[in-house]
Structures are given as structure tokens and as C-alpha cells.
Amino acid sequence: MFKKVLIANRGEIAVRVIRACKELGIRTVAIYNEVEPTARHVKIADEAYMIGSDPLDTYLNYERIIDLALEVKAEAIHPGYGFLAENPEFAKACEEAGIVFIGPHWKVIELMGNKARAKEVVKRAGLPTVPGSDGILRDLEEAKKLAKEIGYPVLLKATAGGGGRGIRICRNEEELIKNYESASREAEKAFGSGALLLEKYIQDPKHIEFQVLGDKYGNVIHLGERDCSIQRKNQKLIEIAPSLILDEERRNYYGSLVVKACKEIGYYSAGTMEFVADKEGNLYFIEMNTRIQVEHPITEMITGIDIVKWQIRIASGERLTLKQEDVKFNGFSIECRINAEDPKKDFAPSIGTIERYYVPGGFGIRVEHASARGYEITPYYDSLIAKLIVWGQTYEEAVERMRGALETYEITGVKTTIPLLLNIMKEKDFKEGRFDTKYLQKHPQVFEYKEHRDKEDFVALISAVISKFHGL
């Protein structure tokens, strides 16, 4: 086992990794910049080093990160999610420097980061894929020809990256012509490659993903699936494990195909195979995330398996002692992403300082966060404040527990997604499991809520009352 690990990340995932390392008896090294010298991950790590002044560059400067790891004698680097987590050049540079990258081999990251090649590989393993191009589109003319063959609507999507960028829905040839260049430009700007795929657009799908664990000796298991259909701007807002659409037989069927595909590509570490599900419940592979996922805690809650600790153990060379038959599923878990955003203004980021911060607790409630009173929400990083996770014996119990937890979660000073999430927990279709990736568009009523009055609003209200009194 490693003696020291450097965490090349920040926020709640850095805190999560540090906690796992502490339980394994590993010393931890945090990195930071001038913007967040008192951040939570900096405070709880055994060592912390400021490696830059530019907040946009700090966690992407892999040469400096590797140099620091060598300086402090860290044997491994955990990338968390985002930033460098799926950067094959970083993983390769770690290998060349003699440092263990806590994740899959860089060649696998490179392979599965290319959606066209990834699709080819998993098809060979028997995973169903969405009908579409077999590889990268040569040009617009090929896209037009293929779209006519498989029928509209179709989806143009970047072969690299994620987060909803470089994706366009085209309902006819006119939209395909209009969107082709703009999707390619956006992908080039975001990921350094403008290459595109074309797929049949599955209308109003569910977003289902399977969690896997594999070691360096060819042992692979799956930990079941999550439903990540509740999204805004193609980014997840609520996740549920297990999904409500797969029974045990279908879970075993798709899970076995996922395991077979992972063995085919030589996958080790934690990873996630993502699918879209049509209205009949058929799953189609769309991509693989070769890293720990934001929503991994809900799988931990229903399986009792610590995914982050296993990720570290596997990287250190340990064998996966868990067998597929050892994985038992108990109850349901839901995660809500508490973001500093204003849902009423198209989820615009809310910048400011948290003034009051009260976290819910109790049986079946877990909060993953790095926030506190006085925590500053900056424009430099993702708007995630915390992940609120609950467990229940049934889906209905989990929904009610989440509703109660959201009602007692207090954050003032910035706008958050809490009021929206609370309305969703009360909404009939969600409570009865009737939702897909278009849920928010189909249920505009969940955006109807009263704003929480923070300190400034209260002071203004009192001032107005006093002014009116004096005027009488």
C-alpha cells in the first residue's frame, strides 16, 4: 500500500479521497492556489502546497503537479473527477515519472475517451449501441447520407469530452446542415478536436449507467446501475440507485455485458459505462467514464462497498477480492446536487459568500461537501456546493427522506438548487418514477417556488416597514 498520495483536485472530491486515504493509513498531500488557501481539503490533508496563483491553471498544470509529487515523495496521484482525471497525457506522464496514476492505464483512457473507437470496442463485446456512424464522420455529406438511412431525428456529438458540449439534436436535414459546423467548432474549442459522430436520437430517453470495478489481474465486477435522468443542460442534477426500470434478470444481463466489455479492453480501477434507455427499457451504450463519478456515493449506499478505497487498493496492486456473487443490493439511494445556481435564471451561477450553512443529518443521510459558513463561491470552478445523499428501504422512503433533508438544509448568501430539488421530491410523476431526461422541460411547475429571504432581503424589508411607519 502507498505511504503517501497527492490529490490533484479540490472541493468535495478531494475531501472524499483524503478521508479514504486516512482510513487506509496513507498520508495525503493537497494542492491549492492563492484563491483558496483555507479551503477544507487544504486544512484536512497531512501536507498542502500552493502551486500557482492562477485558479484556472492550478489543477490542470500537470507538469508542476508531477514535480511536486516527486519533491514530496508521493508514490501516487489521485485525480478525482474533472480537471486531469481523463487526460491520457497526464496519466502517461505519471507513468514515465515513476508515479502511480490512480485510475486505468493511459492507453485505455485514450481509447475510451474517443467515442467512435469506444463504440467499436464495446460492440465487439456484445453491448448494444445506438444506430449511427461506425466511426468519425468524414464530412457533412456523409452525415446527410447516414441521417437519411437511419431516419431523423439524429444526434451530432463530439467524439471527445463530455458535459453536453459539442452535441446537437437535428430533426431534419436543414437543422443538420445548420448544426454541423457549430457542433464541430464548439468541440474543437472545448476538447481540441472537432471530430463528430452521428447517432439515431432516442427521444425522451432515460440515462442509465453501470458502475464497475476491475483489478490489474483481469478480475472485473459490476456494482449495479444508477438512473441519472434528471438533468439540466445535459448535466446531472439527481441520481438514483438502483434504477426503477431494471429487474434482477435484466440487471444481470446488462451487467454481464458491461463486465465482458471491460475485460475486453483490459480495464482496471473504478469506471462507469453509460447508456440511454428507450421507452421499452432497452439500453444502448453511449460512452465510458474512466474515473470516479460524482454520484458514486449512491452505489456505495446500496452495496456497502467503498469504491474510492477499492480504487486506491487496485492502483497499489491489490487483487479485487470481491466476486460478483458478493455484491448485494439493499434498498434505494438518491443523490441531489446542491449547486450555487439560480434555477429560475436558466441555472445561472450564483457567485458570493455563504452566510449561513446548516447541514441535515440523521439515519440514512450523508452529505459530501467542502463548504461551510464563510465559504466563497467563485466564478473559477464548478458550482457544486455539496452532494446530499439519502438511503431508504424503498424508493418511496428514499424520496420522503430526501424531502425532509432538503427542508432542513439551510444555505444563505447565494442562490441554490435546493428549492427546485424540494419541489421535485414533492411532484407526483417523480414520486411515482415517471421521468426521463426531459423531466424539467415537461414539469415547469417545479420552478415555481418562493425565494428564501436572506439577510439583505430581511434588512430591506424592515427598512421599508420603518419608512412606511414614519410616513403615517
Image: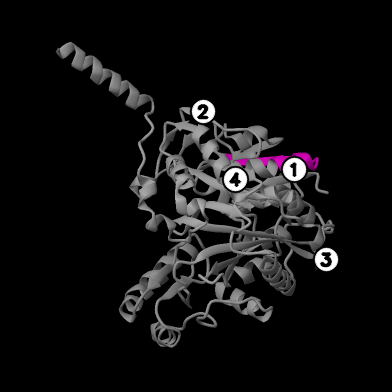
Specify whether residue 68 is painted magenta. Answer: no
Q: Earlier in the sequence, mark 4 or mark 2?
A: 2
The magenta region covers 19-32
Give the distance between the C-alpha atoms of the residues marked 4 and 2, in whole angstroms.
28 Å
The residue mark sitting in front, 2 or 1, is 2
Q: Which mark is residue 217?
A: 3
> Does 22 appear in magenta?
yes
Amino acid type, label 4: Ala
Rendered image: mark on residue 320: none
Give the camera-side residue of 165 and 57.
165
Q: Are marks 1 and 3 in contact (CB under 8 Å)?
A: no
Q: Which residue is mark 2?
A: 373
What residue is shown with label 1? 21
**Disc 1 versus disc 3: distance between alpha carbons?**
23 Å
Q: Residue at x 20, y 16 (%)?
A: 467
Residue 205, compared with residue 227, is above or below; it is below
Of the two numbered discs 3 and 4 in the rendering, the one whose residue sits closer to the viewer: 4
Residue 185: percent from left, percent from top: 40, 69
Residue type of the residue flagged with mark 3:
Tyr
Q: Earlier in the sequence, mark 1 or mark 3?
A: 1
Q: Is residue 457 left or right of residue 62?
A: left
**Can residue 52 be seen at all in this image of the molecule?**
no
Front residue of this view, candidates 427 and 40: 427
Dot 4: element? helix
Left or right side of 299 for 434? left
In terms of sequence position, does the residue under pointer 3 or pointer 2 come before the other? 3
Where residue 29 sits in the image (x, y, percent)?
69, 41
